[in-house]
Amino acid sequence: MAQQLAEISETLQTFIEEQRVFFVGTAPREGRINVSPKGSDSLRVVSSKRVLWLNLTGSGNETAAHVAENGRMTIMFCSFTEKPLILRLYGQARAVHPRDAYWQALRSLFASVIGARQVIDMEVDLVHTSCGWGVPICEYVSERQKLQEWADGKGTEGIKQYWLEKNSATIDGKSTGIEDQR
């Protein structure tokens, strides 16, 4: 059943790459814990101990503030197919913004999309698997296009304005660091 591993094996990397959805969890020292579902081909395993996630513009920006405060992050993958498995990656993360020196190198690993606000760079310190027997079997239908259509409609400057209005602070009032993007 459950296993604790020091790194992502080739088998687990393949499992990660097959998943259509994953979940990101972060928490500040004090305040609300955030868990968000993610998808859209936005995660890359770059080594057995490092993953990158392209954080797209959304209604909130909790992850950036939380990792700036303490770096802690968990990413969970969950199989919804006949072969059950839950995989959690635990580690220390940092948000890389378009203003940062490493932005272009990391950003180039993903498709070009309007609305990319950070690349979250996570060093994995624990890989944990569990059975997933209690997770329902679900069928993948398709990716949603609404987020990208919305971002395309706003354009680059509209997205930057949205960051200032809606993504500058968490629901607990913590700075996300995005306000320096203009």
Image (spheres, grey):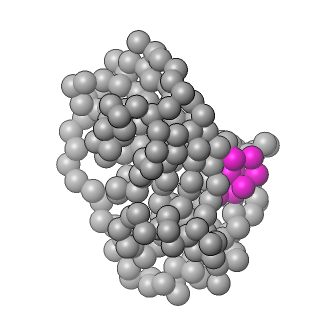
Q: Percent x, y for residue 70?
A: 74, 46
Q: From the image, which quarter does the C terminus lie in?
A: bottom right
Which corner quadrant of the image does residue 125 belong to?
top right
Q: Nearer the viewer, residue 138 or 20?
A: 20
Q: Percent x, y for residue 123?
A: 59, 44
* Image: 103 above or below 21: below
Res. 171 visible in picture: no
Residue at the spot 27% in from the left edge and 56% down from the top edge: 143
Q: Is residue 153 left or right of residue 145?
A: right
Predominant secondary structure in magenta?
Answer: helix
Q: Nearer the viewer, residue 124 or 146?
A: 124
Q: Percent x, y for residue 63?
A: 62, 53
Numbered range of the magenta stretch: 64-71
Residue at the spot 56% in from the left edge and 65% down from the top edge: 118
Res. 182 visible in picture: yes
Q: Is residue 46 left or right of residue 178?
A: left
